[in-house]
Image (cartoon, rainbow, N blue to C red):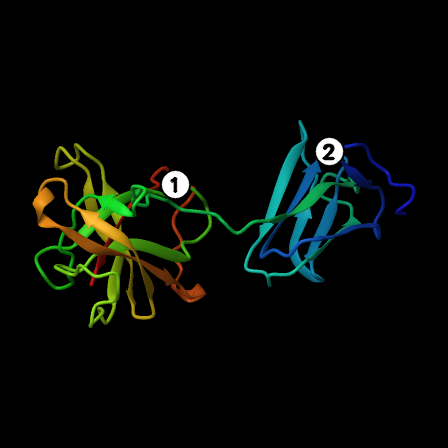
């Protein structure tokens, strides 16, 4: 009954099977979240997004109330409808269902962000290291996984030896070999941390790039400037890196080589 809503300022309650709660988003998004809470009086619920079942829950819980967060990703970028249906009694015998709300989320989640910081005139202070596949040196850096979702895209910055123009070189790399490694903490076998084993790899050939500024080597001020490019690679779903989020180890290494 949209007029006589059973609930309070924080929750809407359903008291018998067949009742439902619906909400329609007013802004487009590719991610929605549904927020619920359960106690000993609660029972079974179905959760649907755009008419598709995304979760079946027994909301009954002993002791203190417990909240549930459902996140649905990779939806079409459009406004979405969320429905929560009360199905019946759960294992504890209760059949209430309480819903806190739903939200459209911005898809701006980052695993790790460590971009170079330019000066006001688009000059990046630092120097480049060779990183070429099948040679004696590739460059890797460690990073901490800061969110539970999969790795879906990669962004990095690089230069070409001796290239000093704000335009593309005559030849770009055929592709980049990107590897993700486990982390060996400092003190295990060396006084410093370093990459361990390769646990994910991809050869990127459909990357994009753009000129973003200049590299300046503070060790050698007379060396001049080299062009700096930003590279981006969007992964297909079957290429995503799915990390062990619930483990204690959330530090990985990534290496990128042309």
Tell me residue 111's x, y (percent): 40, 46
Q: Which mark is residue 247?
A: 1
Mark 1 vs mark 2, foreground winner is 1
| x then y, percent, for residue 204 | 30, 67
Snapshot quadrant of residue 24: bottom right
Q: Callout 2: helix, strand or loop?
A: loop
User: Left or right of 44: which side holds 5?
Assistant: right
* Disc 2 target residue: 40
Residue 98 falls in which quadrant of the image? Answer: top right
**x%, y% of residue 207?**
33, 66
Residue occupying the point 43% across, 47% down: 110
The answer to which of 165 and 67 lies nearer the viewer is 165
Q: In terms of depth relative to the viewer, which is nearer, 228 or 233? A: 228
| Quarter in which the C terminus is drawn | bottom left
Instruction: Say which quarter of the image contains residue 163.
Output: bottom left
Extreme residue in the top direction? 64
Left or right relative to 41: residue 129: left
Mark 1 and mark 2 in contact? Answer it, CB < 8 Å.
Answer: no
Q: Is residue 61 left or right of residue 207?
A: right
Q: Residue at x 78, y 45 (%)?
A: 89
Q: Is residue 233 above or below residue 44?
A: below
Q: Is 119 situated left or right of 53 in this image?
A: left
For marks 1 and 2, give the CA distance.
30 Å
Secondary element type, mark 1: loop
Mark 1 is surrounded, within 10 Å at the Cα level, by few (under 14), some (14 to 19) or many (20 or more) other residues, namely: few
């Amino acid at each position: 009954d949209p007029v006589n809503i059973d609930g309070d300022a924080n929750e809407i309650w359903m008291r018998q099977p067949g009742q439902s709660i619906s909400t329609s988003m007013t802004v487009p998004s590719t991610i929605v979240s549904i927020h619920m809470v359960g106690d000993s009086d609660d029972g079974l619920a179905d959760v649907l997004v755009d008419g598709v079942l995304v979760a079946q829950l027994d909301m009954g819980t002993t002791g203190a109330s417990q909240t549930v967060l459902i996140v649905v990703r990779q939806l079409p970028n459009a406004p979405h409808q969320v429905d929560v249906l009360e199905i019946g009694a759960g294992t504890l015998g209760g059949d209430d269902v309480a819903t806190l709300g739903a939200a459209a989320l911005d898809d701006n989640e980052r695993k790790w962000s460590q971009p170079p910081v330019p000066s006001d005139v688009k000059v990046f202070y630092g120097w480049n290291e060779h990183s070429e596949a099948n040679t004696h040196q590739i460059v890797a850096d460690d990073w901490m996984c800061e969110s539970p979702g999969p790795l879906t895209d990669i962004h990095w910055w690089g230069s070409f030896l001796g290239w000093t123009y704000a335009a593309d070189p005559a030849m770009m790399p055929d592709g980049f070999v990107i590897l993700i490694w486990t982390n060996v903490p400092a003190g295990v076998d060396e006084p410093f941390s370093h990459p361990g084993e390769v646990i994910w790899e991809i050869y990127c050939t459909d990357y994009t790039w753009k000129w973003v500024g200049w590299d300046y080597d503070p060790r050698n001020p007379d060396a001049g400037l080299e062009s700096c490019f930003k590279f981006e690679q969007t992964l297909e779903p079957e290429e995503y890196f799915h990390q062990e989020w619930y483990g204690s180890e959330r530090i990985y290494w990534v290496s990128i080589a042309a």
